[in-house]
Image (spheres, rainbow, N blue to C red):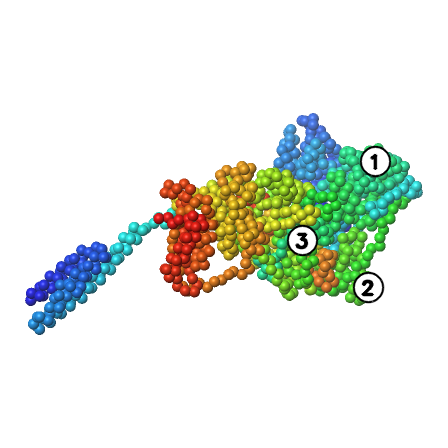
Amino acid sequence: MQMLKQLEGIRLQALDELNRISELRELESWRIRYLGKKSRLTQVLRSLATLPSEERRLVGSRANEIKLSLQANSAQRKEFLERSYLASFLERERLDVTLPGRAVSIGRLHPVTQTLEEICDIFKNMGFQIFEGPDVEWNYYNFEALNIPQEHPARDMFATLWIDPEMGDEARLLRTHTSPMQIRIMEERRPPIRAVVPGRSYRYEATDATHESMFYQVEGLAVDKGITLAELKGTLFDFCHCLFGQERRVRFRCDYFPFVEPGVEVAIECLACAGAGCRLCGNSGWIEILGAGMVHPEVLERGGIDPEIYTGFAFGLGVERIPMLRYGIDDIRLFYNNDTRFLGQF
Amino acid sequence: MKVSLKWVKDYVDISIAPKQLGEKLTMAGMEVKCIETIGLAWKELVVGEVVALIPHPNADRLKLPTVDLGTKQVTVVCGAPNVAVGQKVVFASTGAQLIDGHTGKAMTLKPAKIRGILSEGMVCSEKELGISDNHESIMVLPSEAPTGMPFAEYLGDTILDLDITPNRPDCLSVIGIAREIAALTDHGLRPPRISYEETEDSIDHLVSVSIVEPSLCPRYCASLITGVNVGPSPWWLQQRLRSYGMRPISNIVDVTNYVMLEYGQPLHAFDYQKLRGRKIIVRRAKRGETITSLDGIERVLAEDILVIADEEKPVAIAGIMGGLDTEVTDATDTILLESANFNQAVIRRGCRHLGLQSEASIRFDKNLSPELPQLPLQRATQLLVELAGGKAAKGALDAYPGKRAPEAILFSAEEVKRLSSLEIDVAKITIVLRSLGFECKESRLPSQISVLAPYWRSDVKCAADLVEEVVRIIGYEEIPAIRLSSSLPMREPTPLLSFKRRLSNILVSCGFQEVLTYSLTSLEKLRRLSPDLDVKVMPLKVANPLTKEQEYLRTNLRANILAALAGNQKHEENGIRLFEIGKVFLPQGKELPEEKDLLCALLSGPRHELSWHGDNKSLDFFDAKGVVESLLRQLDLSATFEVSNDESLLPGKGVDIIIKGDKVGVAGELHPKVMQAFELPGTAYLIEMDMEKLLEKTAKLKEYRAISRFPSLSRDICLVIDKQVTYQQVVGIIRSFPLVSEVTLFDFYTGKQLPDSMKSFAMRIVYQSYERTLTDEEVNKTQEQMLDRLRQELGATLRS
């Protein structure tokens, strides 16, 4: 039974060595030593043939038992080593995850651009097309064609910056509103027309917290057969609801602009006091958002469109007012001071 | 226009609360900006009569009036010198809210012992009531004030502050507003009743009028009142002027103002005796003619100013202001009262020319009707007879060369529906229009009516105007909200617009903050970039600039965006990246300027935010160029960069961006002289591109190429070349080999290990075929040919 003793020796030695292994790569040489083709255990198994049959069976089954148990032990050891290796790896790699990340520099669109895009997108979804027009305009397009002849009392509504005239010049000016584009659009197209014109406008007006000499407007125009105040109301109510929320009350009242008749002012329930009356809304509970109306028949005619056949509506809104209301900005001049501490907030 | 509801109630009954009334007016086009209640705090105040007055036993300057309050009599202490028996006064009982006459602060009246006498109440001054600053004397009410009436009822009022649109001069009057209220609340209007006695002397014998240019003065009416006593006007009249914010002057002037507020027709009173030649001539001023206006200022007139003249010289600037020479004074006995109509445009020009506005000119400027003057003239004459004790001469002057027959407008229910969608029958339309003073008659067609606008509504000229009248009285809230259902217009592409939006988004994703700078700038700022600017291209100038800073239309975006950079550098420690896409205005003679869209971007400061990750290097030329390259890559464009001679850029650090042989922009480091001019420390880099040119180069459709099915091979080479040779030259040769698909420079070296005149480029070259798998031999052969050419053409050698 010397063989059995020998096997037991191999087993003990193998287990002892296995338990002392601390690196995964040592595991392979251990396997070769104890379970490989040239290992003592293998040699024992090979020499079985030389043994008497009684002993052969006994030694053979013992040797196989040992082989299986060593394999199992080695797998266990491997798993143990892998686990502890991972644990120590993870421990080494641990970061102070609260350290700030690597900054990616961030750019932003100007809040007025953001608002313009928002407005234009709403109207685009209603089938309007976006156009742009010149900032420097003829007196004709800015006033005459819009039913505001020279010395018309409504000219008081549009304090104008004029271009230095040269002798015999037709008067040029910085457009006081985007409305001249109503005429330019009609001149070049036949109904149906649905157009929206974003752009800069200018006024001869001393600047203060609520007045700027330059500001953005969005003009709208729809001309076709059968357009009425009801379509104007539907369009602008939808627009106000998109911009200020479905719940916000919107009001349509009579107002005067020389190039529309009937004329309309669209106001929304005050954002600050929800209609109760406060400083922001001058205690009225309402905040004016748009001027609008049915295109005046004379304006249609100037645009080359027969007012007997077609009707249309037009509207205009001031853009800066919208972020001012939304964010509670109380000074319009901030928009064109271009201070990054202001712009970076939007 | 401020209007007293008490006054309005003379002409129309008001059955709704002021707030509701305000809402109705606002909805109908007359925005009520504010409703002020006078006398809201007047409690424990009644009208009393002083029935007895004895001196205070312990004080010389104090008196003890006994005041009858209707229900009882009370004796109090009073220090006012003007208190007298028989006066109607305002009596305050304990608990009244008053203003302390000395401190001006609000106080509640308490019983007080004054020099030993208990005073439970007081007789009030105007200051104590908050009516005026007068604390010298007690307020004395007219004798007809009813004893015992609560003061709030006697003098309380509600003042509406209305925003009258320029088309409604008729509403710059109390009657005009009363008329609106009548129509909006379904009440009748009660205009003032006018009647007065006239003398036997006909006005025609006393004065004549001639109008030189009827188009400038369609009508001139006047009456003559003799034997007037100039003095203060009665208290009620003064009170009404004050409610509008007007200061009472004398009965004569107050009556003209009162009737102007009542009817909206400006009137003017001349001292008849001071008119030379008993003549009124309405004419243009002669050049150089002068007049001293009522405000005491001598004004030089011009030919486009209309004047009222006597035989010798101007006595008033027509419709704007009277003259000092013919002003009514205490000595005036006879008054010539003018009620005229002047051309709106001539008044407007006159005001602008003189820099002068008045209550009269504000009204004439808005196109009053020539039909208006007569009634207010009669009304004022009546009041002058009543209040100044005058006698009216028989008849009135009435020169009316500009009379025109009103034009009827054909109108129908269909027209209302066509513009408003509301179905309102002709009967209802007629009722609404009549309530506003319109005359409606049947016309030839049964569905149509013929409408005549009342004279005070010269703004109503066409059917659309009538639709507004009908709808605003019916109520804009009746209009349904319907979505547009008509057919959509043909889509028109707007490539530039979408392109600008696309580029903005690219720049934002590159870390740039968008700015919007003024279209106007100063010549000085533009010259900072280009000292001889005016010689090259003189920018368009604004004739009436608000400030020197905003006098010229920008011909570039650089000036204003550099100013924005300078402004931000003062507070920003991190790098600044700004851009603007906007218009510049290039003059084209007498035509409108060319409005060109440019992109301008600036970079300055550290590349990264200060952080523990390190790299605190400053942005440099290659950051700017990198942005250009990324942007072009997004657009599928490739550019060549050539040394630029842009005068704002540093000569060796600026490039022209060339695409397909065309310059589309520049990029580079700003010249120190520019930096200095804008007070910018450090360095800054500029990118500028012409949007339209860039769009033109950008393919409408991207070019797609399938991914090669064959593997690529890459080779790294390191070339040593003369410093004079550019990278672009090297790459040009490498790329000319068709198998080369990518070239990347991954190292650039100059220094000790090379001769002074040499530099080295380490590059990775990727070879790729779309037809076959490349073999090493093939690539090696290509690379040998490449190196040969580089050596022969550029003197490049492989670095060992």
SS at mark 3 in the image: loop
Residue lying furthest bottom: A53
Residue displayed at 58% across by 57% down = B495
Mark nearer the N terminus (2 vs 1): 1
Which residue type does callout 1 highlight? Thr
Q: Report the Cα–Cα distance between label 1 and label 3.
A: 48 Å
SS at mark 1 in the image: loop
Rendered location of residue B301, percent (x, y):
79, 37
Residue lying furthest front: B792
Q: Report the Cα–Cα distance between label 2 and label 1.
A: 52 Å
Look at the picture and state if B487 lies above or below B108. Answer: below
Residue toward you, B183 or B218: B218
Q: Residues within 10 Å of mark 2 (few under 14, many from 20)?
A: few
Rendered location of residue A156, percent (x, y):
71, 46
Residue toward you, B62 or B455: B455
Residue under mark 3: which chain is it in? A
On residue B443, the disc is 2
Tell me the residue that label 1 is attached to.
B326
Residue displayed at 14% across by 66% down = A42
Q: Does mark 2 fall on the same chain as mark 3? A: no
Residue B24 seen in the figure: no
Residue displayed at 64% across by 29% down = B116
Which residue type does callout 2 highlight? Ser
SS at mark 2 in the image: loop
On residue A179, the disc is 3
Left or right relative to B571: residue A160: right
